[in-house]
């Protein structure tokens, strides 16, 4: 690992832990994902003030973060776009890099701390799986060249359309092999769904053999989200990548404060909920 690579990881992880707030949902071309993100400039300003460890966006919105003065969260840049998040299954499923010829050029231009890419496993859709593997191969080569940490998002998808529930599954028997594959392909960071049984999540962490962040998915009831987040940290997670479970709640900044207490200070779900209500 080069010094530059370590520097970028240190910007992302504070003492090995990270809360990455994802607001890259505009790339999905799905209206439900944009609820709460209509005024993304204000959302970004409020998130920067709340000071999570990182904010995840696409190239076209990264200036809203990187044009702000320090201190500010690290930038995690999404590198791919696909049609797996739409409510209806498409005739052709695809996932492509924004810029296949120079896949991390935009991240370097915007001084990102890491890049993120999907690894979709969708029943009866081998084409999109192959595209994801090819995307990761291009990115891994470029990341090695420029010392950019690579976050891979392995997703075991449901057979039906994506829909409002995000369509991904927490089946640990399918997740573990896919997470292991992501690590074999060169993941520096894994972003994975929670397992259906929270107490199985340690198996995902063991398969990853690198920092493992929990993917949030669709908006849930806040008390349950915080309790589950604390339980996942106890299973060895290094933090969370939450989007709608932050920006679609009534007070996103206070959700950030609650999650940061869980991730960095070991707060329980109940203690984190008290922090939320102190606003």
Image (cartoon, rainbow, N blue to C red):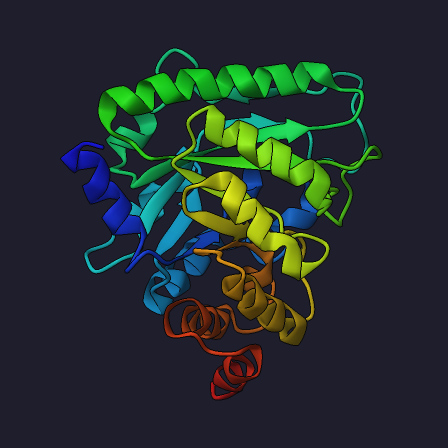
Point out residue 261 in the picture as x, y percentages from the top left corner: 42, 74
Relative vertical location of residue 160 with respect to residue 92 in this rendering, above or below:
below
In this view, the residue in front, 268 or 278, is 268
Q: Quadrant of the N terminus?
A: top left
Q: Is residue 250 visible?
A: yes
In this view, the residue in front, 25 or 148, is 148
Relative vertical location of residue 19 with respect to residue 279 in this rendering, above or below:
above
Q: Is residue 24 visible?
A: no
Furthest residue in direction top, as rendered: 101
Q: Residue at x 33, y 64 (%)?
A: 51
Point out residue 271 in the picture as x, y percentages from the top left corner: 51, 84
Q: How many marks?
A: 0
In this view, the residue in front, 79 or 176, is 176
* Residue 139 left/right relative to 33: left
* Residue 167 left/right relative to 246: right
Q: In the picture, residue 104 is in which quadrant?
A: top left
Q: Residue at x 61, y 15 (%)?
A: 130
Q: Residue at x 32, y 31 (%)?
A: 107
Point out residue 68 in the picture as x, y percentages from the top left corner: 25, 53
Q: In the picture, residue 17 is in which quadrant?
A: bottom left
Point out residue 15 in the picture as x, y percentages from the top left corner: 28, 60
Relative vertical location of residue 248 with respect to residue 151 in this rendering, above or below:
below
């Amino acid at each position: 690992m080069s010094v530059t690579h370590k520097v970028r990881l240190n910007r992302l992880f504070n003492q090995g832990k990270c809360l990455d707030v994802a607001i890259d949902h505009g790339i999905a071309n799905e209206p439900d994902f944009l609820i709460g993100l209509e005024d993304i400039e204000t959302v970004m300003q409020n998130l920067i003030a709340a000071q999570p460890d990182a904010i995840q966006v696409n190239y076209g919105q990264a200036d809203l973060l990187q044009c702000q003065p320090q201190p500010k969260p690290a930038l995690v840049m999404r590198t791919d776009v696909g049609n797996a998040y739409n409510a209806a299954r498409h005739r052709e499923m695809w996932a492509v890099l924004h810029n296949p010829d120079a896949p991390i050029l935009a991240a370097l231009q915007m001084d990102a701390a890491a890049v993120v890419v999907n690894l979709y496993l969708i029943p009866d859709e081998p084409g999109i799986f192959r595209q994801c593997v090819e995307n990761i191969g291009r990115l891994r080569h470029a990341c090695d060249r420029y010392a950019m940490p690579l976050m891979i998002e392995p997703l075991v998808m449901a057979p039906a359309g994506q829909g409002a529930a995000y369509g991904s599954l927490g089946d640990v028997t399918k997740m573990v092999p896919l997470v292991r594959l992501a690590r074999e392909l060169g993941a520096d960071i894994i972003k994975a769904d929670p397992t259906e049984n929270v107490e199985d999540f340690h198996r995902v962490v063991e398969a990853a053999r690198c920092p493992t962040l929990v993917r949030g998915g669709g908006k849930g009831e806040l008390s349950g989200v915080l309790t589950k987040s604390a339980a996942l940290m106890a299973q060895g997670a290094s933090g969370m990548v939450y989007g709608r479970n932050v920006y679609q709640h009534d007070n996103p900044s206070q959700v950030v404060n609650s999650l940061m207490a869980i991730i960095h200070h070991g707060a329980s779900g109940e203690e984190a909920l008290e922090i939320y209500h102190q606003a």
